Image (cartoon, rainbow, N blue to C red):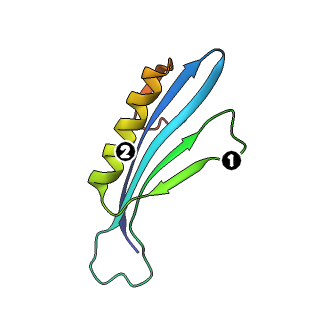
Amino acid sequence: MSEISSTHLTILSKNDMFSFLGVVQTEADEEDEIDFQPMNAVIKQDPRDSQPFVKEFDTQREALRSYRQAVDTSIERGWRIVYRGLPMFG
């Protein structure tokens, strides 16, 4: 199976804590993929929560809108962006 995926993330800092917000988008590049389910989701890992939070959306546009809104809300609440962009490997 071949798929197209993208991930963008934001790492935030506040009072010696780090938080993670990410948006994940995947889609099959062939129409006839039977077992592949596209996914558009926002992922949040807050150090005060025991588990990451994942919310799926019907469209990429909805996922991106929610991701941007979550980042903006975090900034309004005093979080500072440490990194925003593509995941770094290595």
**Residue at the spot of label 1:** 51
Q: Rounded to the nearest whole Å, what is the CA distance between mark 1 and mark 2?
A: 19 Å
Residue 2: image location, x then y, percent: 37, 70
Q: Relative to residue 38, is residue 10 depicted above or below?
A: above
Residue 59 horizontal side relative to residue 35, left or right: left
Q: Secondary structure at mark 2?
A: helix
Q: Are marks 1 and 2 in contact (CB under 8 Å)?
A: no
Q: Secondary structure at mark 1?
A: loop
What residue is rendered at 49% in x and 38% in y? 21
Q: Relative to residue 59, is residue 21 depicted above or below?
A: above
Marking on residue 66:
2
Q: Quadrant of residue 40?
A: bottom left
Mark 2 belongs to which amino acid?
Ser
Sequence-first tag of 1 and 2: 1
Q: Quadrant of residue 30?
A: bottom left
Q: Residues within 10 Å of mark 2 (few under 14, many from 20)?
A: some
Residue nearer the viewer, 25 or 75: 75
Residue extending farthest top: 15
Residue nearer the viewer, 23 or 57: 57
What residue is rendered at 65% in x and 22% in y? 17
Residue 64: image location, x then y, percent: 32, 46
